[in-house]
């Protein structure tokens, strides 16, 4: 999570100190001057019109200055708030995307492996962390945690679990109540487009275990409110804070930004965990209904992970690493095979009619991040960065550093199988043979693949095409060109030349001729959202006339106008919104 | 003094190609420090980089002609115990970015792919170069956020682990943490 502005973790590392509990024994990763940050410098970075990424998009240019200022001012206090609520941070290392180029501002959250899981002591068992068995995930941690010994001490593990569980633990300890299995649909405003927002309406929407049918429950239960009425209306005495995430899982809303992303075959990240309504633009839709304005709607286009081709194949949940053991694993059925970018040279990728559409090797390459002249990479070596300098985006520099392959766009393009009115581009398939399996060591067995419509195997290519057409939920047309594509490909291999996509320049070409033949799904993933409700510096939602909607706050991926990735954005927004909402006079 | 030490580190069948290649790879790696979890090379890394670039001409000029006949990574050049140690070091220092399968698929999905460190693609990219060159390159550039932060013994253990994952046979002797001796061992994709 990247914050900054001279936050307590930057200060700690700058002084070369350990954390208060003395868990960190590793030396600081960053040089002290890279940690010499201030609110003003952070604000300057977040409003830097001049920086461009390697796709020649500008990430900070369209940020709302008021939002950026408020975020910068509240970042140090938010870091302290998190530390005070059992969140432990590793050494600072680099900066998370959208956090500015001038200083190091990112630190991971960690827990220490131990004999018991104890949030107060900062320990977690290997089983709960998901590191005891590479093929099991726990109910405690939906993703297996990562080893971050080097930036803490031996035995340190990290991922969002070390952030979310401590905060949940602390909230439950303080008496916060949770009403789960409930989906908010509408805001209640005094008049349709005027007056205060005084509450929300929410529907009962339980999730059940896909195999046992059991009601899914939260890991901890203390503080849960057992309320099963179909619809409840909840009155808000001080305010409603919308924190329901973005629109990455709502194809209709997504298509505002990129029409081809109306294709429902392509999900958002974490679909098994988040369920069918995850990232469905709830806040944006409800906000629009009471007159809210939108902001930063083009900013989805200038962040490298917004949409990309995942290197995890053979599962619908192609972004995450969940294994059996977590109660929502059944919703995905398979963990998927993460082949990395390098794995894309082992197969041909075909579209819904079985035709190749791009150089496979370049397909998964994500548009790289922000760069500035003289910089080998970004964010990097921030001390040399000169913010708001016209040279950062002069065309000679852009020509020099531009590095985007447009493979994703080829994957989303209409093709022979696209039918009006939607012209869906359809699913994508990695096609390979037994020889490739032996070359790579890919494990085509459960839990990596399963009979869930995202992996197929057959003795002939024709049979493989038939199985895909019959077995995949979004395969709307037959892969009628697949057999001829493979024949053509084998001819290219024999000739050592791929006249269609010039792949021979990037990797060796391998024939596909030894049965059995395989197909793994390739997923375009829309990971996160950068457009949403317009808010002011207090996180109050603003309407189409530029007036605050009283009693309504929003933060995180639900809001637009602030192109900052992930957790840093939402946590500071929550801190700001909570502070101001708590100060409202009770209605 | 320092230059001739590095000369030996980098020597192999084709010293010039090797040295230039290391340099190109440093640049290449720096170009890959991208997007979400891009790392910020430290001041130390920067000075190492500058050092590496300025060193190139002397390194080429000062090559040592009396190198022993090169051996191969297939000759049982590491022990199982060393690879096991390397596995632990790898998990802490390298695994997050290069993945638990060493295939360049990071353990953290928020991170972009990295070069594989084992098997066909890795062997193809390093074919014909020496383990000495690999050690020099790794020390100069890795871990990306703090290059040079492991001991030589740890780097070499990780290399032993990489070879074991690439199905090279273990032997009776450990890979030495000595770049000069590693320069005599050539990486070959096939036995
Ligand atoms: C696998 C993965 C790895 C990531 N790694 C990182 C990382 O390393 N660093 C980083 O900074 N970011 C990371 N991110 C991104 C980061 O997690 C998100 O950007 C961030 O969580 C968004 O926060 P939010 O509060 O806006 O929304 P969310 O975290 O999405 O929370 C929204 C909540 O609202 C609930 N909800 C939604 N709709 C409704 C409704 N109608 N009624 C009731 N409840 C509803 C959802 O169930 C959810 O609990 C990662 C994301 C994923 C999926």
Image (cartoon, grey):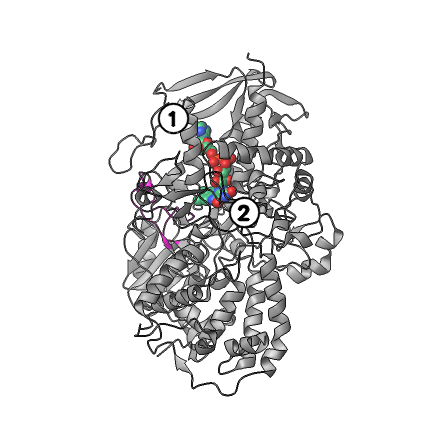
Q: Main secondary structure of the magenta part?
A: loop
C-alpha separation, residue under disc 1 versus residue under disc 2: 35 Å
Query: Could you tell me which quadrant the C terminus of chain A lies in?
Result: top right
- Magenta residue span: A313-337
Numbered mark located on residue A324 in the image: none
Q: Relative to residue A255, is residue A384 depicted above or below?
A: below
Residue A316 lies in the magenta-colored region: yes
Is B176 or A422 nearer to us in this picture? B176
Residue A565, compared with residue B175, is above or below; it is: above
Residue A586 position (above or below residue A330): above
- The residue lying furthest to the bottom in this view is B66
Query: Which residue is outermost to the top?
Result: A587
Q: Earlier in the sequence, mark 1 or mark 2?
A: 2
Label 1 vs label 2, nearer the camera:
2
SS state under label 1: loop
Specify whether B169 is left or right of A161: left
Question: Which of B31 and A319 lies nearest the eye of the viewer?
Answer: B31
Residue A184, by quadrant, is: top left
Residue B70 picture location, percent across and down: 42, 83
Q: Residue at 29%, 37% (x, y): give it.
A: A210
Tell me where residue A141 appears, x and y as whole percent. 36, 40
| Residue farthest toward the right in the current orientation of the protein | A390
Instruction: Look at the numbered discs 1 and 2 and tell me whether their residues touch, using CB distance below 8 Å.
Output: no
Give the side of residue A190 with respect to residue A230, left or right.
Answer: right
Place of residue B31 in the rendered image (x, y in percent of width and height, measured from the top left): 58, 61
- Density class for disc 2 (Cα within 10 Å; few <14, some 14-19, many ≥20) is many
Q: Could you tell me which secondary element the residue under label 2 belongs to?
A: loop
Q: Is mark 1 within 8 Å of ligand 1?
A: no
Residue under pointer 1: A180
- Residue marked by disc 2: A92
Chain to which mark 1 belongs: A
Residue at the image position 68 percent from the left and 36 percent from the top: A65
């Amino acid at each position: 999570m990247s914050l900054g502005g001279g936050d307590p973790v930057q200060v700690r590392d700058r002084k070369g100190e350990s954390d208060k509990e003395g868990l960190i024994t590793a030396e600081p990763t960053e040089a002290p001057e890279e940690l010499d940050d201030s609110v003003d410098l952070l604000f300057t970075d977040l409003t830097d019109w001049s920086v461009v990424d390697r796709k020649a998009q500008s990430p900070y240019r369209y940020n709302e200055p008021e939002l950026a200022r408020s975020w910068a001012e509240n970042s140090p206090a938010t870091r302290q708030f998190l530390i005070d609520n059992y969140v432990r941070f590793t050494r600072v290392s680099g900066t998370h995307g959208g956090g500015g180029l001038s200083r190091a501002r990112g630190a991971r959250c960690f827990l220490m492996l131990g004999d018991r899981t104890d949030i107060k002591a900062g320990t977690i068992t290997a089983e709960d962390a998901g590191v005891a068995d590479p093929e099991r995930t726990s109910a405690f941690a939906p993703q297996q945690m990562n080893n971050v010994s080097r930036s803490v001490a031996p035995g340190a593990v990290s991922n969002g679990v070390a952030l979310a569980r401590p905060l949940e633990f602390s909230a439950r300890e303080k008496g916060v109540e949770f009403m789960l299995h409930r989906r908010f649909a509408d805001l209640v405003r005094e008049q349709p487009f005027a007056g205060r927002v005084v509450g929300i309406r929410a529907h009962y929407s339980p999730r059940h275990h896909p195999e046992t049918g059991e009601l899914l429950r939260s890991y901890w239960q203390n503080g849960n409110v057992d309320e099963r009425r179909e619809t409840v209306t909840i009155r808000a005495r001080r305010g409603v804070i919308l924190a329901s995430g973005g629109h990455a899982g709502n194809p209709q809303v997504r298509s505002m930004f990129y029409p081809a992303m109306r294709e429902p075959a392509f999900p958002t990240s974490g679909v098994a965990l988040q369920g069918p309504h995850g990232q469905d633009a709830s806040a944006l839709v409800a906000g629009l209904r009471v007159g809210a304005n939108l902001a930063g709607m083009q900013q989805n286009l200038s962040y490298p992970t917004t949409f990309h081709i995942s290197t995890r194949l053979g599962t619908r949940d192609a972004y995450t690493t969940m294994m059996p053991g977590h109660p929502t694993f059944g919703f995905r059925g398979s963990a998927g095979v993460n082949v990395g970018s390098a794995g894309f040279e082992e197969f041909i990728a075909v579209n819904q009619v079985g035709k190749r559409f791009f150089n496979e090797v370049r397909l998964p390459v994500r548009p790289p991040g922000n760069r500035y002249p003289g910089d080998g990479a970004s964010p990097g070596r921030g001390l040399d960065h000169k913010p708001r300098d016209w040279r950062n985006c002069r065309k000679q520099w852009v020509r020099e550093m531009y590095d985007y392959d447009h493979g994703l766009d080829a994957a989303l393009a209409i093709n022979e199988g696209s039918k009006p009115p939607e012209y869906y581009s359809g699913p994508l398939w990695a096609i390979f043979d037994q020889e490739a399996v032996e070359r790579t060591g890919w494990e085509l067995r459960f839990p990596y693949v399963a009979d869930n419509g995202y992996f197929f195997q057959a003795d002939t290519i024709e049979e493989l095409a038939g199985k895909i057409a019959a077995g995949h939920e979004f395969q709307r047309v037959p892969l009628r060109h697949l057999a001829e594509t493979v024949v053509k490909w084998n001819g290219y291999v024999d000739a050592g030349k791929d006249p269609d996509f010039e792949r021979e320049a990037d990797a060796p070409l391998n024939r596909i001729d030894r049965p059995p033949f395989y197909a793994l799904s390739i997923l375009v993933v829309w990971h996160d959202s950068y457009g949403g409700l317009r808010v002011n510096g207090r996180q109050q939602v603003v309407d189409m006339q530029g007036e605050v909607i009283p009693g309504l706050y929003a933060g995180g991926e639900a809001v637009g106008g602030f192109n900052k990735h992930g957790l840093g954005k939402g946590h500071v927004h929550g801190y700001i919104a909570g502070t101001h909402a708590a100060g409202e006079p009770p209605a | 003094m320092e230059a001739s030490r590095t000369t030996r580190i980098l020597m192999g069948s084709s010293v010039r190609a090797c040295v230039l290649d290391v340099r190109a790879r440093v640049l290449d790696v720096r170009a890959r420090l991208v997007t979400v979890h891009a790392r910020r090379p430290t001041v130390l890394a920067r000075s190492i980089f500058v050092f590496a670039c300025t060193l190139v001409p002397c390194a080429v000029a000062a090559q040592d002609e009396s190198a022993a006949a090169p051996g191969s990574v297939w000759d049982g050049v590491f022990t199982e115990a060393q690879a096991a140690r390397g596995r632990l070091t790898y998990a802490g220092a390298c695994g997050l970015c290069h993945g638990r399968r060493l295939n360049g698929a990071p353990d953290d999905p928020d991170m972009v792919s990295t070069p594989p460190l084992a098997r066909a693609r890795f062997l193809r990219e390093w074919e014909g170069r020496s383990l000495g060159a690999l050690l020099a390159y790794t020390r100069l550039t890795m871990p990306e956020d703090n290059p040079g932060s492991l001991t030589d013994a740890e780097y070499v253990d990780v290399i032993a682990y990489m070879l074991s994952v690439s199905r090279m046979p273990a032997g009776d002797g450990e890979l030495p943490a000595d770049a000069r001796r590693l320069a005599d061992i050539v990486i070959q994709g096939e036995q």
